[in-house]
Amino acid sequence: MPIDPKQEKPAVCVTGANGFIGSWLVKTLLQHGYSQIHATTFPGSDASHLFSLPGAAADSLRIFPVDLLDSDAISAAVRGCSGVFHVASPCTLEDPRDPDADLLKPAVQGTINVLRAALDANVKRVVITSSISAMVPNPSWPSEKPFDESSWTDLDYCKSRQKWYPVSKTLAEKAAWKFSQEHGMDVVAIHPATCLGPLLQPNLNASCAVLLQLLQGSKDTQEHHWLGAVHVRDVAKAQVLLFETPEASGRYLCTNGIFQFRDFAQSVSKLFPQFPVHRFTDETQPGLKDSKDAAKRLIDLGLVFTPVEDAVRDTVASLQTKGLLCTVNTTIS
C-alpha cells in the first residue's frame, strides 16, 4: 500500500476531526496533499475552525455529523475512502455520571462500527488512535523495565479505582484487534502520551488541561495517567506516517521519552517561573523507568520528535491567546 508522493493522494476519513488531535491530523493531511478528506464530527459540535486551515475548502474537506453509535452515518462517511483514521472517542474533563453509556459503549461499539464500515468500503488501512491509557496503569509491569508496546492497562485495577477512561480505551483497542484478526483487516494503532501544542479547536481539551492545571498550582501527580508528553504536531505526523508506511503494523507508543511527571513539572517551572507550579519532591510515578527512546518503533520509521520544552511553550502561548491562562506574579516554593 505504498503512497507515492507524486500521485494523487487517496480519499481518507478522519473521525473526531474537530477535536484536538483530529484538527491537527486534518491540518497535516492537507499539508501532505490529501485533497479528499471526510471529516466526522459529533452532531451539533463546532467544526468551523477546520475551514480556516490552509488548503481546506468545501471541495477538499467534507463534514459528516456522526454519532459513533449510528452505523449508517459512519458508513456514509467512510464510503469512497481508501484509509480511515479513527480518532473519535469520548473523553471528558469531569468524571462520567454513567461510565457505560458515556464512555465504554461509545468507545467500544463506536470502534467496531468504524471498522465494519471500513471493511464494507474495502478500506486499505485503518489507523486507530489509542492512548497510553491503554498501556497504563499496569501495576504488574517490572519496575526496572521501561514501558513499551507490550504493556496493557490492568482493567480490574482501573475499575476498582473508578478510572473509566483507561478502561474505555483498552476495551476499544482490544475490540479493534479482535475484529481485525477475524476479518483480516489492516489495522495499526498509535498510543500518544499527554498531547501538548496549540489548540486549533475553540474549547479546552483534556491533555492540555493537565498543563493548564499544573500552571495554576495543581498538586495532582498524574500517577495513573502519565508516561511522558508529546507535541500534537508529532502525533499527527506519526498518524500519517503509519498510514503511508506499508511495513507498519501493531502498536506504536508516541511520546518524546518516558519520565516522571515530577521532572516535567520542574521543567515547566523553569520555563515559566511566573506561574505557581508545584515542585514535587517525591517520585510521582513510583518505580517508573525513564527512557529517552521509548517511541523507538516510530523513531525507526523516521519520526523526529519536537522537544518537550517547545511543546510546552506552544501550549502556553495558545492558552494565553485563547484567554484560558492569565499570567500571575507569585510562585510556590
Image (spheres, rainbow, N blue to C red):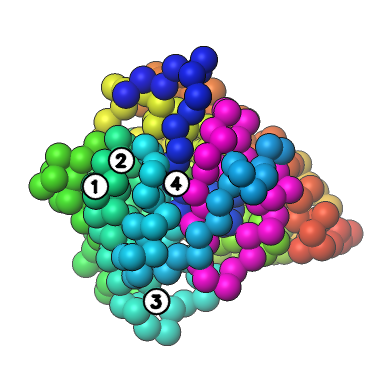
Name the amino acid, label 3.
Asp
The numbered mark, 2 or 4, whose residue comes first in the sequence reads: 4
Report how far apart the C-alphas of labels 3 and 4 lie in the structure.
24 Å
Tell me the tag on residue 13. Answer: 4
Marks 3 and 4 in Cβ contact (< 8 Å): no
Residue stretch in magenta: 25-53
Name the amino acid, label 2.
Val
Dot 3 alpha-carbon crowd within 10 angstroms: few under 14, some 14 to 19, many 20 or more: some
The numbered mark, 1 or 4, whose residue comes first in the sequence reads: 4
Q: Describe the element under mark 2 as helix, strand or loop.
A: loop
Tell me the tag on residue 123. Answer: 2
Query: Seen in the image, is 301 located left or right of residue 269?
Result: left
The numbered mark, 3 or 1, whose residue comes first in the sequence reads: 3
Q: Which residue is painted at 49% across and 49% down in the image?
A: 38
Report how far apart the C-alphas of labels 2 and 4 lie in the structure.
10 Å
Name the amino acid, label 1.
Leu
The numbered mark, 3 or 4, whose residue comes first in the sequence reads: 4
Residue to which mark 1 is pinned: 119
Residue to which mark 3 is pinned: 102
Q: Describe the element under mark 1 as helix, strand or loop.
A: helix
Q: Measured along the vertical axis of the image, is residue 313 above or below residue 320?
A: above
Q: Describe the element under mark 3 as helix, strand or loop.
A: helix
Q: Is residue 107 visible?
A: no
Is 286 inside the magenta-drawn segment?
no
